[in-house]
Amino acid sequence: MSVSRCPVEESSSMPNRAKIGILLVLGFSNKDKVGTIQPHDDALVVTLRIGGYDEKRVTIDQGSAADIMYPDLYRRLNLKHENLTAYNSPLVSFEGKMVIPKGQIRLPMQTGTDVVEVDFIDIDVFSPYTAIMGRP
């Protein structure tokens, strides 16, 4: 598994912040398919380092345009409401219900040796996952 990204320019006023509009791509090669039955429709659940912690139960959802953080991850990272920035666009849950996000936060995410900044939308609903990584 690999993460690729466009070059990032750092701003002197905000070090280590990725510029908006940078495409992140989580990709797999043919050798990643070895030992799997193809075609498959199983959920892709991975462990990623988010905010400096190894987070299990992160699902990859190519049908989602957003990166979502659920309450378990929010609590484990000891985030406070004041850490969030406003996010005013409602989302639609898997059940088709409207969900109002609590806010948004940018956190470092690492896969392998690559570290990228990801804007997670924090929502307060139950999920068996800690986060959803959507498409770029």
Image (cartoon, rainbow, N blue to C red):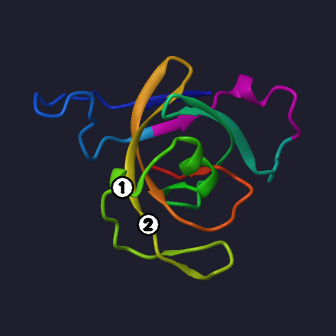
The one of 59 and 107 positioned closer to us in this rendering: 107
Compared with 134, 49 (above or below) is above
Compared with 70, 38 (above or below) is above
Q: Is residue 28 magenta?
A: yes
Compared with 114, 21 (above or below) is below
Kindly check if marks 2 and 1 are in contact, taking CB atoms under 8 A apart as contact: yes
Residue most extreme to the bottom: 97
Q: Amino acid at mark 1?
A: Leu
Residue 83, given in percent of the width and then of the height, sits at 35, 50
Query: Is label 2 in a helix, a strand or a loop?
Result: loop
Q: Is residue 33 magenta?
A: yes
Q: Residue 94, located in which quarter of the rendered image?
A: bottom right
Q: Is residue 13 left or right of residue 114?
A: left
The one of 24 and 84 positioned closer to us in this rendering: 84
What residue did someone put label 2 on? 102
What residue did someone put label 1 on? 84
Q: Which residues are magenta?
A: 25-37
Are there few (<14), some (14-19), or many (20+) residues within 10 Å of tag 1? some
Q: Amino acid at mark 2?
A: Lys
